[in-house]
Image (cartoon, grey):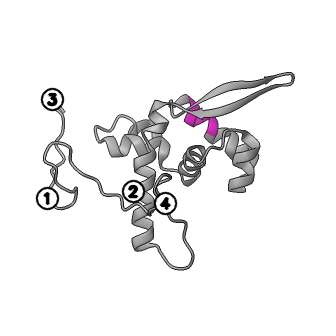
Amino acid sequence: MNDKNICDDPCPIARSLAFLGDAWSLLILRDAHLGLTRFDQFRKSLGIAPTILTRRLAMLTEEGMLEKRLYSERPPREEYVLTAAGRDFLPVLVMIGAWGHQYRGGGRLVRIQDAETGEEIKPVAIDEVTGAKIGTRPLRFVLPDGG
């Protein structure tokens, strides 16, 4: 798939994967949710090459998931913080983690806990309109009118 063509795709999954489908991007967003903000923090956490990290941070910034903020004037240094869109991505990351626990488990895995209660969370995706757990009722993907 070519990024230019996929971004015109009417499917929101395809459009999202056009820029988020890279594992590095998802892991950067995970680390940002864990409180990392600086280039060196991401590099150390991920073991990623600086050139790849630079490109992914630029793309996530350009796409509105992160924003750069100056944290030091001398020398000038910037950090990357989550935007509203980036913060809204947390449930997606948690659902990917839950799927991974169920189908890619084995060995020691990180568990996600409620910070206040210490209880492990058990995320589920619920349709706000019907209240049904997604995956328990048939779904249909419908093209927009005129498409």
Label 4 sits on a secondary structure element that is loop
Which residue corresponds to mark 1? Answer: 137
The picture quadrant where one finds residue 2 is: top left
**Relative to 65, 16 lies left or right:** left
Query: Around disc 2, counting alpha carbons within 10 Å, would you say few (fewer than 14), some (14 to 19), or many (20 or more)?
Result: some
**CA separation, marks 2 and 1?**
18 Å
Q: Residue at x 49, y 60 (%)?
A: 118
Q: Looking at the figure, which quarter contains the C terminus?
A: top left
Q: Nearer the viewer, mark 3 or mark 1?
A: 1
Residue bearing the label numbered 4: 118
- Label 2, label 3: how far apart the Cα atoms are: 33 Å
For disc 3, the marked residue is 146
Amino acid at dot 2: Met
**Which of marks 1 and 2 precedes in the sequence?**
2
Which secondary structure lies at badge 3? loop
Q: Which mark is first along the chain, 2 or 4?
A: 2
Mark carried by residue 40: none
Q: Nearer the viewer, mark 4 or mark 2?
A: 4
Q: Which mark is residue 95?
A: 2
Q: N-terminal of the two: label 3 or label 1?
A: 1
Rounded to the nearest whole Å, what is the CA distance between mark 4 and mark 2? 19 Å
Are circles 2 and 1 on residues that touch, CB within 8 Å? no
Q: Which residues are magenta?
A: 57-61
Nearer to us of marks 4 and 3 is 4
